[in-house]
Amino acid sequence: MGKDELDRLLLEAHDRDDHAALIRYYTIAADDCEASQDIDATCFYLTHAFVFALEAGAPEADTLNARLAAHDRAHRLEF
């Protein structure tokens, strides 16, 4: 998926307040940035995905928190 398409999907998910899609798309964006070793951008997107996962009570929150902790951007939480 290209960056333009991902940006469009993120905006649409925000318009719909679709937390599941926001978690998915922010995680994809983080994965893309991590693949290019842009850790600051990776953590920016992971943080957004994590916040939406927390708000939704989604199980992805644990994995997202672990990824942020691995980059020293968060403390590891117990879920």
Image: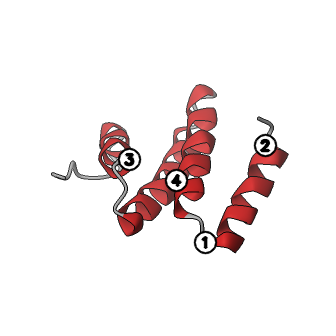
Mark 1 → mark 4, Cα distance in angstroms? 11 Å
Q: In the displayed orientation, state which residue is furthest to the top.
A: 35
- In the image, is 61 to the left or to the right of 37? left
Q: Which of the labelled discs sits on residue 79, or is there none?
A: none
Q: Earlier in the sequence, mark 1 or mark 4?
A: 1
| Residue 19 position (above or below residue 71) | below
Q: Earlier in the sequence, mark 2 or mark 3?
A: 2
Identified by mark 1, the residue type is Asp
Q: Earlier in the sequence, mark 1 or mark 3?
A: 1
Q: Which of the labelled discs sits on residue 60, or is there none?
A: 3
| Tag 4 residue | 23
Mark 2 → mark 4, Cα distance in angstroms? 16 Å
2 and 1 marks in contact (CB < 8 Å): no
Q: Position of residue 72 (x, y in %)?
A: 32, 44
Sort mark 3 into few (<14), some (14-19) or many (20+) by Cα contacts within 10 Å.
some
Q: In the displayed orientation, state which residue is furthest to the left.
A: 78
Q: Which of the labelled discs sits on residue 17, or is there none?
A: 1
Mark 2 → mark 1, Cα distance in angstroms? 20 Å
Q: Nearer the viewer, mark 2 or mark 3?
A: 3
Q: Nearer the viewer, mark 2 or mark 4?
A: 4
| Residue 50 position (above or below residue 63) | below
Identified by mark 4, the residue type is Ile
| Tag 2 residue | 3
3 and 4 marks in contact (CB < 8 Å): yes
Identified by mark 2, the residue type is Lys
Q: Earlier in the sequence, mark 2 or mark 4?
A: 2
Residue at 82 percent of width and 46 percent of height: 5
Mark 2 → mark 3, Cα distance in angstroms? 22 Å
Q: Secondary structure at mark 3?
A: helix
| Residue 28 position (above or below residue 16) | above
Q: Secondary structure at mark 1?
A: loop
Q: Secondary structure at mark 4?
A: helix
